[in-house]
Image (spheres, rainbow, N blue to C red):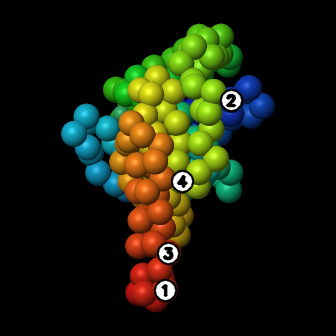
Amino acid sequence: MIDLEKRMISKAGGRFSVQIRDEDVHRFLSKVLHVDKQDCWIWGASENGRGYGQFYMKKRPWLAHRVSYSIFKGYIPSGMVVDHICHNRACVNPHHLRLATNQQNSQYRSGAAPRNSHSHVRNVYWLKDAKVWQVGIGLNHKYIYGGIFKSLDDAQECARKMREKYFSPEFQGN
Ligand SMILES: [Zn+2]
């Protein structure tokens, strides 16, 4: 018996849901870039501008970590969010994901974020619970992970170098 519920995913807020087909699963796994030292599965496709991976099904973007949870662990009940235990937004390893209530999640946020939780620096994102800055750029529908940094200055410098490398005319010409 196919457990249909395991392969369904709903939009946060439960506005609608779709079935995740086998071909979606294969396509999803083909976009995992590499596994890092912490066993994080680094998402290698587009990101949503806040460091979270994005995966398209039925012409709509879905958060990649929610898709991973829905494929490997099961249906996300309405009102629940999927939280990264590893604090790495680019990660889609199902073993690093857990369900949390919206309330738990916002408590998490309000407790840990510094006042400048949004860096206002391009390609730099604050990982609230790890208290580090993550650098990553989106390029040709790929998310390129740059690393994590304690200091915003270092993160900014890394983001600048990445843009220089990946957005240079030489690179674009390849
Ligand atoms: Zn992870």
- Indicate the secondary structure of the residue bearing disc 4: loop
Q: Which residue is mark 2?
A: 12
The three-letter amino acid code for the residue at tag 1 is Pro
Q: Which residue is mark 3?
A: 167
Please state the horizontal and vertical placement of residue 40, each as a whole percent of the image: 32, 38
Circle 2/circle 4 CB separation < 8 Å:
no
The three-letter amino acid code for the residue at tag 4 is Asn
Please state the horizontal and vertical placement of residue 146, each as a whole percent of the image: 38, 53
Q: Which residue is mark 4?
A: 123
Q: Which residue is mark 1?
A: 169
Q: CA distance from mark 1 to mark 2?
A: 39 Å
Mark 2: few/some/many CA within 10 Å (<14, 14-19, 20+): some
Vertical placement of residue 121 versus 83, above or below: below
- Indicate the secondary structure of the residue bearing disc 1: helix
- Indicate the secondary structure of the residue bearing disc 3: loop
Res. 39 mark: none
Circle 4/circle 1 CB separation < 8 Å:
no
Residue at 47% of width from left, 63% of height from top?
160
**Of circles 2 and 3, which is in front?**
3
Residue at 42% of width from left, 40% of height from top?
151
Quadrant for ligand 1 reads top left
Q: Earlier in the sequence, mark 2 or mark 4?
A: 2
**Of circles 2 and 4, which is in front?**
4
Residue at 54% of width from left, 53% of height from top?
123
